[in-house]
């Protein structure tokens, strides 16, 4: 049942408040990138050739740049340099690069190098890697950091294909969000090709000492040699996840799906770079209990990478859909119990986030208003969990079968396109509601999208296993010894719930009893350890401080680091400790984590 009806016209590019580009005039369709990676200078140097369509016979093309050193510009194959102009710097956005062109110009080549202000890049010394032998470089381009390492039209609404040639020191391998090598070569020269058009925020590069291990013909894992075995074990369900995802919402559009495990400073859990998810090593729990993160990144191959939010104000179109999709994969793989527990943990986080904003805040709307702000401010639980709640409400209202068909059509009809919130609402009305005014009213989508907080018609779910956890926590609060609690066979989710349900304030002997009984401070599961460390900070539980310090010095994942610093600065003593730790931990963090912690410590 494809293309039976005319679907709303989905624009290739919409007005993006976070890009200087004027895609209605001249728009990129292909990028040719040649880069040399210099670890001594911490610099990428090379050439970006932008192939574009001059739609409006424009006399110029505008690109986004931030902190790039532009060395020269050429038109097409001309040997003489051409004039260019960098506009003045705008906060968060950087500088527009204006290149005058002729009506017949097809491409512009920009000779450039990156600077210390290349916020997408993190250069790691050998000591900051797992193997401790070789340096490592990785990029994080989302939301608007691609422009700090490539001069490009950096808007999620603008897609292009790319080819790249990357020279790295010998002994190292390079991978990109493209067709990738599986072995090192002696010259250190790697060629990449991305044939499916992607937006700039999905440009990605990692360079280091890693190896490849296939899981099946389509999936595999890249990791440092010392980590590869652990990583392969942890991600062994990947082929199954991919099959489940396809059976739900249609064929996988990107040929291969690999995961690369990065050093612990990676600021996010994962980044859905097409064909190769970049992942934090903090999900290597040893028991495959934290792999829903991989299901999430895989789901982005449909929601986000295939059908992309038009601007960062529409971020829920990427993330809400992905959290919903992720849960469906996990439900098929591990059962409804498991998925429900994760759902409840997500709702818990959402409530905390909204409470932090204040329940009338515009930041709790699904449609965000990030104009003039750093789009990074919109990257929180609202897009993810409130977005998911709305989709679950749709599923419950229309029934799973109908909703699945709707989503499947959405992904195939809007593939390799961009969609904003208004276009999605139109699509939802024409393809799902279809005049069913009772259903339309029951959901009240406008209220979810343009209103604050969590609407009262939000789906309610129960988890029997979580109810059991609550009973055990209660027994302990009433004075039963921790060792008598029935926590046998607790999953990671149940332990997390357990820790979250503990009273805010605990006495030192209570913290000690829990720690001695359940060994929380020694947990090798990063989620459990993090939840416990948060408790430790709030209750000034000193026995956990050495672990807290080493955790914060090693791990740069913002989801963990930010709440711990936030908790520490609530007391004078805690603030002192936070400042002390940050002196040594800051250099280990990627710029996105650094700016979040700088804000907590120095702007409050
Ligand atoms: Zn995501």
Image: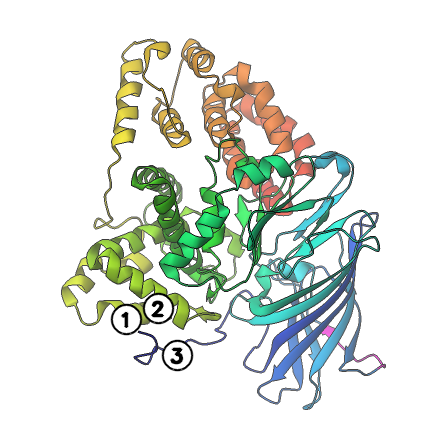
Q: Quadrant of residue 391?
A: bottom left
Q: Main secondary structure of the magenta part?
A: loop
Q: Nearer the viewer, residue 431 or 75?
A: 431
> In the drawing, does residue 468 fall left or right of residue 161?
left
Residue tagged 1: 431
| Badge 3 element | loop
Work out whether residue 379 can be spotted.
no
Q: Quadrant of residue 333?
A: top left
Label 1, residues with CA under 10 Å away: few <14, some 14-19, many ≥20: some
Image disc number at residue 409? 2
596 drawn magenta: no
Q: Position of residue 63 (x, y in %)?
A: 65, 71
Residue interval drawn in magenta = 79-85
Which numbered disc, 1 or 3, marks the residue that appears first in the sequence?
A: 3
Vertical order, 116 against 194 (above or below): above
Label 3, residues with CA under 10 Å away: few <14, some 14-19, many ≥20: few
Q: Position of residue 445 (x, y in %)?
A: 27, 61
* Residue found at x 34% / y 45%: 331
């Amino acid at each position: 049942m494809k293309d039976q009806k005319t679907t709303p016209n989905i624009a290739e590019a919409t007005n993006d408040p976070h890009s200087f580009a004027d895609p209605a005039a001249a728009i990129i369709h292909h990028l040719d990138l040649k880069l040399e990676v210099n670890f001594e200078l911490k610099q990428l140097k090379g050439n970006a050739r932008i192939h574009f369509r001059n739609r409006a016979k424009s006399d110029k093309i505008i690109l986004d740049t931030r902190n790039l050193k532009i060395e020269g510009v050429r038109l097409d194959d001309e040997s003489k340099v051409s004039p260019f102009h960098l506009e003045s710097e705008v906060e968060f956005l950087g500088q527009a690069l204006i290149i005058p062109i002729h009506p017949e110009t097809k491409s512009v080549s920009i000779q450039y190098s990156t600077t210390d202000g290349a916020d997408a890049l993190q250069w790691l010394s050998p000591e900051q890697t797992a193997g401790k032998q070789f340096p490592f470089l990785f990029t994080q381009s989302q939301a608007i950091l691609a422009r700090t390492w490539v001069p490009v039209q950096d808007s999620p609404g603008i897609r292009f294909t790319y080819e790249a040639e990357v020279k790295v020191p010998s002994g190292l391998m390079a991978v990109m969000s493209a067709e990738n090598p599986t072995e090192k070569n002696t010259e250190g020269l790697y060629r990449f090709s991305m044939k499916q058009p992607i937006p700039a925020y999905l440009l990605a590069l990692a360079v280091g000492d890693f190896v490849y291990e296939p899981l099946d013909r389509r999936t595999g894992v890249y990791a440092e040699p010392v980590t590869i075995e652990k990583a392969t074990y942890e991600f062994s369900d990947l082929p199954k996840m991919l099959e489940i995802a396809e059976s739900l919402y249609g064929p996988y559009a990107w040929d291969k799906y690999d995961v690369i495990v990065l050093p612990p400073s990676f600021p996010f859990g994962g980044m859905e770079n097409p064909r190769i998810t970049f992942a934090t090593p903090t999900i290597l729990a040893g028991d495959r209990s934290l792999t829903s993160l991989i299901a999430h990144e895989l789901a982005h191959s449909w929601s986000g990478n295939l059908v992309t939010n038009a601007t960062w104000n529409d971020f829920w179109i990427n993330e809400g859909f992905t959290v919903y999709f992720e849960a469906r994969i996990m439900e098929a793989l591990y059962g409804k119990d498991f998925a429900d527990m994760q759902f409840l943990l997500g709702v818990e986080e959402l409530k905390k986030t909204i409470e932090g904003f204040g329940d009338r805040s515009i930041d709790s709307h699904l449609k965000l208003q990030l104009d003039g702000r750093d789009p990074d401010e919109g990257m929180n639980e609202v897009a993810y969990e409130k977005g998911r709640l709305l989709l679950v409400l749709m599923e419950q209202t229309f029934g799973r079968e109908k909703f699945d068909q709707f989503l499947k059509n959405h992904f195939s009809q809007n593939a390799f396109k961009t969609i904003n919130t208004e276009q999605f609402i139109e699509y939802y009305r024409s393809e799902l509601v279809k005049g069913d005014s009772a259903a339309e009213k029951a959901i009240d989508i406008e209220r979810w999208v343009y209103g604050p907080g969590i609407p009262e018609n939000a789906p309610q779910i129960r988890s029997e296993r979580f109810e059991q956890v609550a009973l055990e926590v209660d027994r302990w609060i009433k004075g039963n010894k921790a060792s008598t609690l029935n926590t046998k066979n607790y999953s990671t989710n149940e332990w997390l719930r357990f820790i979250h349900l503990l009273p805010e304030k605990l006495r030192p002997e209570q913290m000690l009893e829990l720690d001695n009984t359940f060994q929380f401070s020694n947990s090798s599961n990063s989620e459990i350890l993090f939840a416990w460390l948060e408790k430790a900070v709030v209750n000034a539980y000193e026995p956990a401080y050495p672990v807290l310090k080493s955790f914060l010095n090693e791990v740069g994942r913002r989801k963990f680091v930010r709440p711990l610093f936030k908790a520490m600065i609530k007391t004078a003593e805690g603030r002192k400790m936070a400042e002390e730790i940050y002196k040594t931990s800051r250099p280990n963090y990627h710029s996105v984590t650094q700016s979040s912690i700088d804000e907590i410590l120095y702007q409050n």
